[in-house]
Image: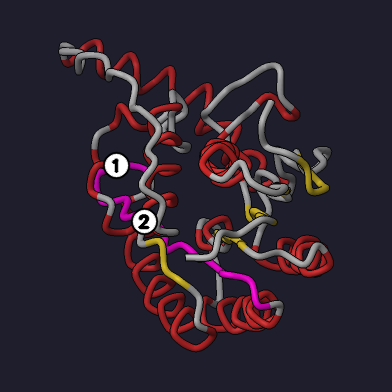
Amino acid sequence: MEFSARYVALGDSFTEGLGDTDASLPNQVRGWADRAAEQLALAHPEGEFGYANLAIRGKKMGQILAEQIDVAVAMKPTLVTSYAGINDILRPKVDIDAMIARYSDGIAKLAATGARVLIFTGFDASTSKVFASIRGRTAIYNELVREVADTHGAELVDYWRFREYNDWRLWGIDRMHMSTPGHINMANRVLEQVGETVRIPMPELPPIPVKTMAETVKDNAAWTKEYVGPWVSRRLRGVSSGDNLLPRWPELRSPLR
């Protein structure tokens, strides 16, 4: 298999890397895309390998299409990953058919470059007390994304079927974004998708804590105050945690630090 030498990652917080904290990096996160890019570069030391990550937390589909697609096309990528639309699904109202029609146009632009394009289905949040309510929307989104992949020859990274993410140790303390182990696992899933045999070693997961009912109630109350409240407030005010952020890696660069 011919190896991709210019990898561009598109999307929102999922691809930016929230939950995988690294204070030494732009926006203080690392994430699965950085980790996958590093492994690809290490596995193929011959020639040059360029990596850009245009993803910014909180971005909705329209913003990703307007701000990231043409920039990616101009980089003449040979590999693109894209995850977009979940922030739209979380809003009270969304026209999923219209949204995916626009997404299809964006994926068509990427596919026309000749790049290998990977797009993701949404996660099955059936085990989340907060996000289980959007499971039906996500299922519709996923079926339409599958059709986009079929139409444009994109490859599907089927996050919906990754049942290991039912283990909450793969999620961060905000319960909305993957933890470092979750990001490492996703990087390995992407490496598998592109046909690489290399894998990043998974860290040992901590024991699952056993909590009393009182401790669980206390933890849930603290989590609601610290994470859910601000998240809901931002949506009511029409603002995003990514409004003042720039892409972490806006230009092609070596992913090796």
User: Which label number is shown at residue 159?
Assistant: 2
Disc 2 element: helix
Q: Is residue 110 left or right of residue 32?
A: right
Residue shown at 52%/58% (left/top)? 86
What amino acid type is highlighted by mark number 1?
Answer: Tyr
User: How many marks on residues?
Assistant: 2
Residue 179 position (above or below residue 6): above
User: Which label number is shown at residue 20?
Assistant: none
Residue 172 position (above or below residue 83): above
User: Which label number is shown at residue 165?
Assistant: 1
What amino acid type is highlighted by mark number 2?
Answer: Tyr
Q: Is residue 91 left or right of residue 221?
A: right
Residue shown at 50%/82% (left/top)? 153
Q: CA distance from mark 1 to mark 2?
A: 9 Å
Residue shown at 62%/62% (left/top)? 80
Range covered by the magenta-colored residues: 114-130
Residue 124 falls within the magenta-colored stretch:
yes
Q: Position of residue 134 (x, y in %)?
A: 38, 59
Given contact means CB atoms under 8 Å apart, are the residues at marks 1 and 2 in contact? Answer: yes
> Of all residues shown, which one is farthest toward the front?
46
Disc with the residue nearer the chain's start (1 vs 2) = 2
